Amino acid sequence: MAKITFITVDGTRYDVTADSASTVMEAAIRNGVPGIEAECGGACACATCHVYVDEAWREATGEPQPMEEDMLDFAYDVRPGSRLSCQIRVTDALDGLVVRVPERQA
Ligand code: FES
């Protein structure tokens, strides 16, 4: 179980609770966080679940795997900290995670 904060472009914060073994994308969808579309349902095939991981959390969330890296090429406005939220698995170690939602998805 982990608390995750999503911050949208207008600065609105959405504090949600996510089950361990779910993904950050699933937590966003379940809680109606705007701006996370997740068109492929978590298959790493759409890049519409793109988020920016807060700098303090980049080590804990780890690096994207090659398949995610390839898909990130299709995301809008990729920056350091860009991840596909369907590829970030929730663990207790991510309690307090902060991610930002991009201005728009791919
Ligand atoms: Fe499609 Fe994450 S939901 S890539």
Image (spheres, rainbow, N blue to C red):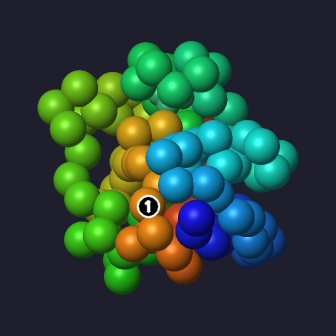
The single residue placed furthest to the left in the displayed view is 66
Residue at 46%, 69% in the rendered image = 92
Can you see residue 55?
A: yes
Residue at 40%, 40% in the rendered image = 87
Residue placed most toward the observer, 18 or 100: 18
Residue placed most toward the observer, 72 or 41: 41
Residue 61 position in % (x across, y down):
33, 62
- Label 1 residue SS: loop
Ligand 1 contact, mark 1 (Cβ < 8 Å): no
The answer to whether residue 49 is left or right of residue 93 is: right
Instruction: Please name the residue that numbered disc 1 is placed on.
Output: 91
Task: Give the answer, above or below, for where 95 lies relative to 106.
Answer: below
Q: Residues within 10 Å of mark 1 (few under 14, many from 20)?
A: some
Residue 93 position in % (x across, y down):
39, 72
Quadrant position of residue 44: top left
Residue 56 position in % (x across, y down):
36, 82
Can you see residue 7?
A: no
Residue placed most toward the observer, 29 or 52: 29
Residue at 73%, 41% in the rendered image = 29
> Which of the image's four quarters has the N terminus?
bottom right
The answer to whether residue 40 is left or right of residue 15 is: left
The answer to whether residue 85 is left or right of residue 102 is: left
Q: How many marks?
A: 1
Amino acid type of the residue that numbered disc 1 sits on in the rendered structure: Thr
Residue at 16%, 32% in the rendered image = 66
> Which of the image's four quarters has the C terminus?
top right
Residue 77 position in % (x across, y down):
44, 47
Residue placed most toward the observer, 45 or 31: 31
The answer to whether residue 104 is left or right of residue 42 is: right
